[in-house]
Amino acid sequence: MYKLIATDMDGTLLNSNSHISKQNEDAIINAQEKGVIFVLASGRPTPAMIPFVSQLKLDKLNGYLISYNGAAITRCSDNKNIFSLGLNEEDIRLWWDIANKYDVSIVTYVDDIIYCSKHTEYVDIEAKVTGLEVKEIEDIKELDFTKTMKCMLVAKPSKIKELYETTKKTLGDKYFIAISNPHFLEVANINVNKGQTLEHLCNLLNIKKDEVIACGDSYNDVDMLKIAGLSVAADNSPSDIKDICKYVSVHHDSHILEDIIKKYI
């Protein structure tokens, strides 16, 4: 019996309009009412996930948020952060310098503001997805480093692929590095990813990994998919993501969570 469902948001739970379909919403609420714990696990900053909490009744039905690619856990019942492990000033400065070297923009987050080194069309993609305000800064001294959970290099897909291959070789043993979207290279603390943080949450809740369903569509979901008893890929996932999953569901515009919950809950 599955006791917990964790799902990625963009490209998985959310449709192409970045909305949760009524079919997914009803299925998720129904599963929670049966006692299943529901977890949104995203690269998004926490403030960009909060609007979905009330829609899915996560605050009333004991749900959780895993945000910033695993750098934080929020308990929705009291909106309390119960885990966080971010990047410090040295980390942010290193990646800021890398972004400048490769002439791409870098973004990080403090509260509900996206801070960037230069405001580009790729920063606007993230702003549209998250609904957060963008502020361009010249020096990272302006940042509150107690709140910098992750950073992200944003650029055209070919540049992101080049940056991934380069930085994974040189810094892959010091940071979690993954492509979450063709335009986004995610960087987080080496000790966090969606999988490690989901495992930590399961330990807190006394839930075994084989009692977990995890759903995703991209490379920053891999660690989460690998630890779950049932790993599910969206049909729109790359083929190598599908290959590591036990079940391939429907396209993210065709109500993935409804499909999974009907089959397995």
Image: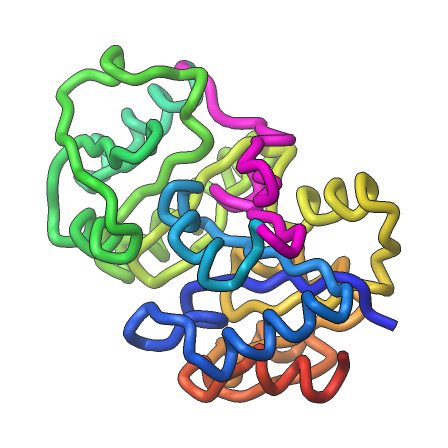
Q: Nearer the viewer, residue 180 or 15?
A: 15
Give left or right: position of 230 versus 208. left
* Residue under the image location 12 percent in, 46 percent down: 120
Q: Which residues are magenta?
A: 60-89
Q: In the displayed structure, would residue 241 be above or below residue 35?
A: below
Give left or right: position of 88 versus 157. right
Q: Nearer the viewer, residue 59 or 177?
A: 59
Percent of width and height locating residue 95 = 35, 29
Q: Is residue 152 visible?
A: yes
Hey, which quadrant is residue 156 in on the image? Answer: bottom left
Give left or right: position of 260 versus 120. right
Q: In the displayed structure, would residue 246 be above or below residue 41?
A: below
* Residue under the image location 29 percent in, 27 percent down: 96
Asked if residue 76 lies in the magenta stretch, the reply is yes
Q: Is residue 73 visible?
A: no
Residue furthest top as drawn? 141
* Residue under the image location 28 percent in, 61 percent down: 157
* Residue under the image location 76 percent in, 79 percent down: 265
Q: In the displayed structure, would residue 139 be above or below residue 245?
A: above
Hey, which quadrant is residue 196 in on the image? Answer: top right
Percent of width and height locating residue 112 = 30, 35
